[in-house]
Amino acid sequence: MTRILALIFFFLILGIVLISRADDTLPSSKNFVYQGQNLENFSLYNELKSTHYREETIQATCTRQIPYQETVRVPVTRYRTEYVTIPGRNECHTEYQQVARTVTRYRQECSNVGGGIVCEMINGRRVCRTEPGHQVCRQVPYTETIWENVPRQVCNWIPPTQEARQVAYTDYEDRIETHYRTESYPCTRVVQIPYTVVDKRFQANVTMEFDITSVPAKVLFTVSLDSQGKLVINPKDQSDKAVLVAVARQETEEQVGDQIQINAQIKALFKDKESVLSPLKNDIFNIYIVPGYLHFYAGPISDQNTFQVRLTVQEENGPVVLDKILSHEQYQIKNWNNSGQVIVDLDPFNLPSHKRYKFLMEAAVNLGLGWEVLGISPENLFKRKEAVRNF
């Protein structure tokens, strides 16, 4: 009886171990094409690994440097004295000597000629008067001695001389030099051996359910389980008319043995991409206020169920008095040509009148709580515009 109980206990433990072991034969990603089916069920597996190192002693061949001496003949530079005869030569230079020279120059000399007192008898009386003379000038020569610097070349004879010079030449001498040769010998060496450790094991059991009310679509899905245990969904649209892909996830995790088991329920729906994103085709423009209503324009609004308006109102240089995602009942939509007009009723918000406000309008695509749009970055799912207006 004891033996039977032991066997039962052994097989029970073995069963638990087999159940708890992750199925590492499962792929880490799954590709499939959606073409109208309701469900896709599959399992994925991945591991979080890290590299560690252990030390091992191995037999190896080591080398060492063995010194030895050797006599070598090396060139050296030496110098000897050589005498060179410098031939005689004239060394000339210019000197200046003062020389006197007599030159004739001229100066002007002037004198008065004629004139004086002239007397005569007039009616028995002697009458005198003074007559003016006139000036006569002439050039009178004279001599002057001047000194000038006159150049002349003076040469001195330098007799031949003997000059000693140091002349380099190459000689050779013997030297004892130390050299090294490489010698091999058997030894042991400690090396780092890398090995991989599985830190975590993940298995994801995935059920994808497709919304049958969606628009017709053909989409290639790639669902991957990364090494951190995260499910990544990448859709590639192959539909005749472009679709927007959105998913809503419900994921739970539990530790089963040495693995983390992920149970993922994923709902997917498909929307007409053009009609959903058309409100974001244009920037928000033409913002104005008429009594009680805020008007602004965006792209054409084809699908009102996926269109969302967020309104933030702040007093100019003051506090925020309103920050709200508006319900569909709080605004009207009118489409004109290639744009959509949004009319927001401001009366329910009881904004004090005769003030200046800063209005921040945000037009966005929102498929509902929990829905994640795939393939489009979040910043491309809304448009914002700020304007200051009187109210």
Image: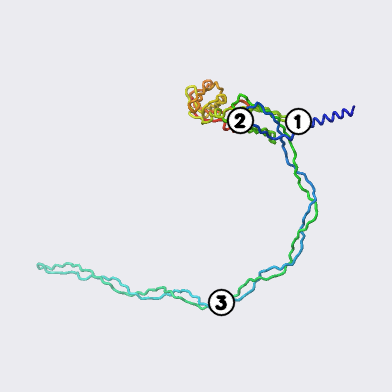
Residue nearest the observer in this picture, 3 or 121: 3
Return the mark for residue 172. Answer: none
Front label number (1 vs 3): 1
Q: Nearer the viewer, residue 120 or 78?
A: 78
10 Å neighbourhood of mark 3: few (<14), some, or many (≥20)?
A: few
Q: Position of residue 382 (x, y in %)?
A: 56, 30
In depth, the one of 206 and 339 nearer the eye is: 206
Q: Are marks 2 and 3 in contact (CB under 8 Å)?
A: no
Disc 3 marks which residue?
86
Mark 2 to mark 3 CA distance (whole Å):
107 Å
Q: Nearer the viewer, mark 2 or mark 3?
A: 2
Mark 1 or mark 3: whose residue is earlier in sequence: 3
**Is 82 above or below relative to 265?**
below
Mark 1, Cα crowd under 10 Å, few <14 / some 14-19 / many 20+, is some
The quadrant the N terminus occupies is top right
Residue 352 percent location from the top left of the image: 51, 23
Q: Hey, what amino acid is under mark 3?
A: Ile
Judging from the image, what secondary structure is the residue with disc 2 in?
loop
- 115 versus 188 height, above or below: below
Could you tell which of marks 2 and 3 lies nearer the N-terminus? 3
- Mark 1 lies on a secondary structure that is strand
**To which residue does mark 2 refer?**
218
Model colouring: rainbow
Q: Which residue is mark 1?
A: 256
Q: Amino acid at mark 1?
A: Val
- Which of the two residues, 73 or 94, is positioned nearer the viewer here? 73
Q: Position of residue 66 (x, y in %)?
A: 77, 60
